[in-house]
Image (cartoon, rainbow, N blue to C red):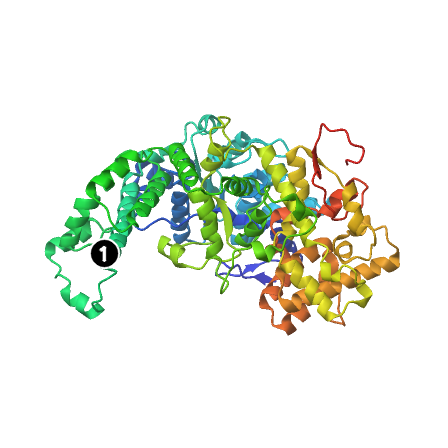
Amino acid sequence: MCRLSANVSTPICLTFDNTENFAGCLDILYFKELHARREKVMVAQENTSTWIWDHATYRKWVEKNSGLLWIQGKPGSGKSTLMKAIMAKLTGKFSSNSIVADFFYSARGSTSESSHKLMLRSLLYQLLDREPLFFALFQNSFRRFMSNSADKAEWSFHDLSEILLSLSSKSPRNRRYTIYILLDGMDESEDADQEGRRRVDVLSLMSELCSKNGEVAIKIIIASRPANTIEISLAGFHHIVMQRENQQDILQIVRVGLRSIWDLVNKCENDSDLTSDDDEKAKAPARSAESDSISSKYPAIRLDEENYRAYRRELGPAEEYLTKHAEGVILWVVLILSELKCHFERGYHTPQEIQEKLISLPTDLESTYQRIIDTLEESNADLSQARFMLMWASFAKRPLTVREFQDAVIISPDLPDDTLIAPIHLNDKRVQIRRNNWRPVQRQIVDICGSLVETVYINPSTEAKRRSRRVHGTDTVQLLHQTVKDFLMRDVKTSKLHFTEQDSHYLIANALLRYLKISLPIKDLKNKTIPFWNIEDYRMFVDHLEDRPLLDYAFTFLRQHVESSGVVLKLQPFQKLLSRTQDGHTWLLLEKDYIAKATKKKSNVRELFRISCMTTAIEAGHLQVLRLLLRTQEDLIRKRSRGRLPLDIARESGQQAVVDFLQNPRSFLWSWELESNLLCSYCCDNDENISWGLESDLLVPNHRDNDEDV
């Protein structure tokens, strides 16, 4: 049997057994957040990041057979953007014997984005997917893995690193390969994993890889902030310091930003001009040779001679000030340009005001963050709400979508206690969305948190497209930069937004518990037994679950937030609502097979109930409900409803997104979802049933003595 690789034009011939093993190996290496961080990194602005191609150190690394290059830079100096540009350049130079694999670490994302083991899985998946012949080097480890496989078997760090090392010494069919490995954000990786592997072990592995003189050339680039362990481990390898080289990038970004401000000023001045476009074109001055020369010399500005002179007169001092004080930190430049733009949006200015404004602005990141907080205070922003939003952005176990984030922050710590008895109506608290554009929620986040939190788009291309495109409910929310979290958590408690990790997990856990209380059980179905449900009841139930976007997160991660908070989860108050009857819809939805205390007959009721829910969810195209159902009972995907499999129902209903999901559900699930149990599993571990009542002191500190605590 021949398999045609997506990236290789020549079919690769494998035996039938090997083809199955090859596909199985790819499947268990794969995880959805393979490129989660990289996809959030903006593409380099036009005419930036080009200096690297002619840099002497980079050229030496390129020309060497194997080698390692360390790109070191201050926080916010543009390392990730540069790494994405390098990846695109190397990938563009594609040849059948060249393979590029990358991993972008991130402390702002889920734990999977800082995991060394998942980094190795990502690299090996990319290499094997690109070159199936490498499977010969995977086979022994893969067979050993499969023979020892349990329900939750995992590749070990040792197995993965051994496979990677074997690639550097053995080449299938004696072909010469060059493998490029790009690792960004090494300083944001975990310092020690569950197997006790430290960051220095990964650095040692990478050093060994590129030091071998085998049949495969391995070239590695590692980007990070300055750090002693990294500096010691990579001593002697090629080394570039970002802030010494990115002055031209900063100048280009400054000019593009100031040109945007200039356009805003001119727009304000021309708002009352009622002349037609044709008249305006007729009045436009003819371009002179000098103006063409200006555009050629300053491509970011692109102004005619007269406008260029006015631009230099009014914004020239700002250009000089920003480039002089940036000190290699592009993020600072972006923040200051944003503040300048707000100043110009008033519609008027004087040269003296601009100069005074510039002098008043901070010249380092941390002072800039403090200024943002001071500005929020002066504008009477809800700092308590801002603090809670920043906690969520800092310590969510995975990045929340815009849709989830809106519900998460509605259940704030300041919510009155009576909401625990009389559940609030979420729709009354939600920002209203029209035509499925979630930009109003984005604006609410910015109003409350300033620029400390940002909405992240997948695969953004240019800043212009980023500003103009719609905000989707599936876009994610994260901190502007890892340094925001570092700043807010510092011991010096001068900021009203200061928080600790333990406090954050405690408040998040309480919010999730409140969310469960106001979401389940459904009032209109509470007293109606399952056997008497009709199709409308199932639709009401499934629609309700889909309208509670944070439920899936709560079921999956409440346990982890509780454990990280240093508190004990009291399950006894949970008994009242669900333990009254095991036929209730919430219990039947969430009960896991191994904690069932019901009879076989009731177990059948539970399965029939879930199959009916799945059928209804498929017909409605509710992917969130499908994910929840499949993680509650994995074999539902093979259960028939009136003789039809779920995939058949999706096709008949014309739900293509559901078809894609059911054909490969693993590719739609994040690694944490594959490894996490629902909340009911937590209760099972503690020999308790679960139900969803709530007490105001549901979470209590560990030091309290309480016989009812689990």
- The quadrant of the rendering that contains the N terminus is bottom right
Horizontal and vertical percent for residue 35? Answer: 51, 49
Horizontal and vertical percent for residue 153? Answer: 70, 44
User: Toward the viewer: 133 or 472?
Assistant: 472
- 694 to the left or right of 383: right
Q: Residues within 10 Å of mark 1 (few under 14, many from 20)?
A: few
How many discs appear? 1
- 645 to the left or right of 111: right
- 598 to the left or right of 75: right
- 661 to the left or right of 90: right
The residue where tag 1 is placed is 269
User: Toward the viewer: 330 or 100?
Assistant: 330
Q: Secondary structure at mark 1?
A: helix
The residue type indicated by label 1 comes to Glu
Horizontal and vertical percent for residue 347? Answer: 27, 51
Residue 164 shows in this picture: yes
